[in-house]
Image (spheres, rainbow, N blue to C red):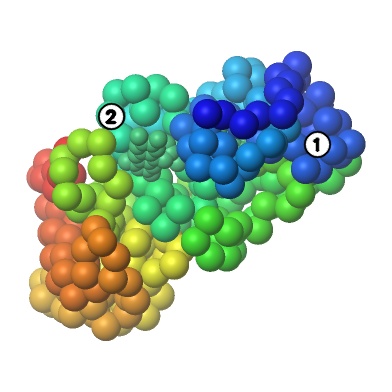
């Protein structure tokens, strides 16, 4: 049933990077919730697996002295949904993580796996795009920082190079301080279902006008995307006008596809609606309310 040729567990981050340098064809496995499906479906038939599961260097969430936050890749959905720093400063990411799968999946699936899987429906991707997340990518003797916005190349395709490991996800203080927002996942069922369409919105307001807005969507294109045209059109508008315009702007910008889960027309309709709900919830939070539009 599972065609695995070889399995090894890395003893440390350095060990993982050295093994990958020697054999870049090794398949990395973290929580395994996507990897095991790929093996069972035959896409990774006969693979040699390198497990990073449990490596302490790749776990935890921390804030540095500047206030920047680093989320290490083995942070599970469940940990992210309950982490104090994430819940306080990055609530839209906590909502994204909380909306994934069911309890077993949230205990197993990691943020790193959710990013590296490259799925258009990844529940943490829209929030991380709004937060201008930067990826810390390392291979033996080399490291680079890559904005998440440049990481996605197509459905299931990313800029991760052979032998490279995602070692951290960084969010700068200026990308969360003063913002309000949320994540909304629209799926057929309220649990154990991937998104038909999803939206994260992050809003900063001055004098009841849009000072900065970031909007990202899942399943609205072949990869998770930011919506720069909509963001530009809303910039500077009074909040009330922004609320009236956002749904149509979103529908004009995104390119969802037809699939057995939902038609393109249905996704366009829902996309405008959930963006408007996220905008309303962000405005409510700016005004001191406690609106929660999450569908979970
Ligand atoms: C029943 C079920 C329900 C699901 N529901 C949802 C859902 O509601 N929402 C959602 O977003 N996803 C869902 N998923 C998909 C999956 O659980 C997530 O994408 C999860 O975050 C994957 O994490 P993982 O640690 O299990 O990844 P793995 O399966 O271990 O790895 C996934 C991919 O990422 C690579 N990878 C992992 N970590 C790293 C790293 N640090 N560096 C480089 N490459 C790495 C692996 O090589 C592999 O290609 C579901 C999956 C299942 C089986």
N-terminal of the pair, mark 2 or mark 1, is 1
* Image x and y of residue 277, in percent: 13, 59
Q: Using the image, tell me which numbered label, if any, was put on residue 20.
A: 1
Q: Is residue 112 above or below residue 146?
A: above
Q: Is mark 2 within 8 Å of ligand 1?
A: yes
Looking at the image, residue 97 sits to the left or right of residue 222; the answer is: left
Quadrant that contains the C terminus: top left
Residue 196's image quarter? bottom left
Would you say residue 236 is visible in this rendering?
Answer: no
Looking at the image, residue 45 sits to the left or right of residue 189; the answer is: right
Looking at the image, residue 147 sits to the left or right of residue 41; the answer is: right
Residue 236's image quarter? bottom left
Q: Nearer the viewer, residue 262 or 137?
A: 262
Q: Residue at x 73, y 21 (%)?
A: 8
Q: Nearer the viewer, residue 255 or 293?
A: 255
Query: Could you tell me which secondary element the residue under label 2 belongs to?
Result: loop
Looking at the image, residue 278 sits to the left or right of residue 154; the answer is: left
* Image x and y of residue 291, in percent: 11, 45
Q: Which residue is mark 2?
A: 102
Q: Residues within 10 Å of mark 2 (few under 14, many from 20)?
A: some
Q: Residues within 10 Å of mark 1 (few under 14, many from 20)?
A: many
C-alpha span from label 2 to label 1: 32 Å
Query: Could you tell me which secondary element the residue under label 1 belongs to?
Result: helix
Q: Residue at x 69, y 36 (%)?
A: 47
Q: Using the image, tell me which numbered label, if any, was put on residue 59.
A: none
* Image x and y of residue 53, in percent: 60, 22
Q: Nearer the viewer, residue 276 or 106?
A: 106
Q: Residue at x 50, y 42 (%)?
A: 41
């Amino acid at each position: 049933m599972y065609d695995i040729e070889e399995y090894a567990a890395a003893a440390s981050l350095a060990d993982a990077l050295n093994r990958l340098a020697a054999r870049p064809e090794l398949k990395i496995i973290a929580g395994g919730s996507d990897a095991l499906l790929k093996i069972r479906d035959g896409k990774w038939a006969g693979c040699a697996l390198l497990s990073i599961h449990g490596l302490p260097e790749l776990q935890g969430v921390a804030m540095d002295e500047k206030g920047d936050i680093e989320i290490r890749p083995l942070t599970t959905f469940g940990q992210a949904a309950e982490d104090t720093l994430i819940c306080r400063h990055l609530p839209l990411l906590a909502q994204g993580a909380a909306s994934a799968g069911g309890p077993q999946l949230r205990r197993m699936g990691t943020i790193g796996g959710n990013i590296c899987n490259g799925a258009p429906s990844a529940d943490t991707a829209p929030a991380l795009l709004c937060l201008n997340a930067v990826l810390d990518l390392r291979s033996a003797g080399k490291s680079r920082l890559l904005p998440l916005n440049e990481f996605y190349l197509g459905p299931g395709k990313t800029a991760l190079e052979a032998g490279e490991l995602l070692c951290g996800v960084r969010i700068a203080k200026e990308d969360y301080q003063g913002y309000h927002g949320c994540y909304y996942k629209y799926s057929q069922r309220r649990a154990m279902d991937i998104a038909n369409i999803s939206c994260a919105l992050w809003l900063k307001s001055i004098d009841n006008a849009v000072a900065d807005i970031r909007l990202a969507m899942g399943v609205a294109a072949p990869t998770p995307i930011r919506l720069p045209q909509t963001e530009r059109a809303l910039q500077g508008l009074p909040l009330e006008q922004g609320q009236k315009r956002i749904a149509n702007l979103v529908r004009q910008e995104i390119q969802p596809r037809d699939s057995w889960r939902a038609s393109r027309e249905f996704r366009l309709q829902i996309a405008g609606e959930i963006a408007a709900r996220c905008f309303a919830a962000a405005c409510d939070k700016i005004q001191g309310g406690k609106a929660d539009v999450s569908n979970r």
